Image (cartoon, helix red, strand yellow):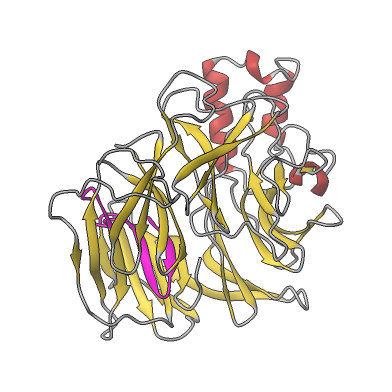
Amino acid sequence: MMIISCDDDDSMGDPDPQPDTTSMDTATNKTTGFVVSVNTGTGALTKYFETLPTGTVDISDGTDFQSFNQQDIFEGAFYGQNPNGTEELVKLIVDENGEFQIVGSFATFGRVDPIAIRDAETGVYFDYGNPQSLTVFNPTDMTIIGTIDMGGAEYPRDEETRYRELYIRDNLVFAPLGSFASPIWYNPMVTHIADIDQGTFFGNATVELEGPARHNQYFGNSYVDEAGNLYITDQGDLFTGTPARLHRINSGETTFDLDFELNLAATLNPQNLFFSVYNSFYYIGNGKGIASVTSDTPAGLLEILASVNFNPTALNQDQLNEVQVIIGQSENAAWCLIDLNAQTVTAIDGIPSQSFNHRFTIEEADGLWYLPVKSSTENAYYSYDPATGATGKAFDVVGGEILRFANLANNH
């Protein structure tokens, strides 16, 4: 595939065709129902449910895939890397019999990650084997429309880079930059912007951080509000003491709003100065978001930091290893409601906490939001009603560790 640019009429040109690898099937797919996927340690078991699961849900008899890293859903179809491991982008459906079926695919140069679907005619993905570019495709007939040359964008370091997520707002796609190399953190955090309709690089959006950080990546989550404001996450870096913050690019703008920078963990608990991280942010509507936010700094972590005068960069390798164990075992990340206008963060009562390391997508059905909890005692989804604040366990999962829960009626 060659890198193309606009022709005289500002439309995207035709790419060089790949070898005859595009395939399509005319099977009818379900557009309602639910899919639950679990990690078995050796693969992913995935199962379709006609109605919302309740009680204890056994996935042990589900379809066995090598992985289930499907990154977007549109009109009931999943889009992502082939779940059986080959390097191709696939359109995966639940057919009329409740079975998973690949109905469209085409070969890629490498791993495909991330992917975003705008509408029935337009999707965008990043191909590991085709860096410094984005590929635009038609998700209905699974054909490639063209590639966008991103080589003129800003790159903080002279190294191979990747995009950690793709956010589509109108004709623009916003692509936060990451690195294949170590360290993978950047300061400033850079987001590349491309015009999908024109097929061209548009510009850069950068924001200075307190220290090195990276963008937080969660497939299928929602980041654009009703007004068109775009929320972009960063993960911070515990090992340089950089807190994780939430950033915003306002509606109609393509640069960061420097007056909006929300440290969710410190807002939840101002005393939590050394474990200020969050994950799984999702915009749920009416100026509100949900995220899993750390509520305090574990005592063991404080003891280790005190031994180096609270300078994380002075930790030796043995201490770094111990910190990793503490982070993995500390179940202090609470699901929280974020009021983006008032800039407040409130823990949601009735839902158990879990380790910060657990990152999942969340899902909505009939006005309730379904939040995953995986801990030493839980492997379940809890429901949350933002209108009333009511919570409750929706269903437990057995057969593997929870990985993905999807409502086929929702486009992501």
Query: Observer-nearest residue: 164 or 84?
Result: 164
Q: Residue at x 73, y 32 (%)?
A: 274
Instruction: Give residue 362's quadrant in the image.
Output: bottom right
Q: Position of residue 379 (x, y in %)?
A: 50, 63
Query: Observer-nearest residue: 155 or 303?
Result: 155
Q: Is residue 370 above or below residue 265?
A: below
Query: Observer-nearest residue: 280 or 329?
Result: 280
Q: Is residue 75 magenta?
A: yes
Magenta segment, which residues? 66-89
**Residue 404 can be seen, yes or no:** yes
Tally of numbered discs: 0
Left or right, 36 with respect to 20, comes to right
Quarter of the image with the N terminus is: top left
Q: Residue at x 87, y 56 (%)?
A: 342
Instruction: Give residue 247's quadrant in the image.
Output: top right
Q: Is residue 278 magenta?
A: no
Q: Position of residue 84 (x, y in %)?
A: 22, 56
Left or right, 205 with respect to 375, comes to right
Q: Is residue 226 above or below residue 209?
A: below
As drawn, the residue found furthest toward the left would be 20
Q: Is residue 116 above or below residue 100?
A: above
Q: Position of residue 90 (x, y in %)?
A: 28, 60
As drawn, the residue found furthest toward the front would be 8
Left or right, 253 with respect to 164, comes to right
Q: Position of residue 154 (x, y in %)?
A: 54, 27
**Residue 399 can be seen, yes or no:** no
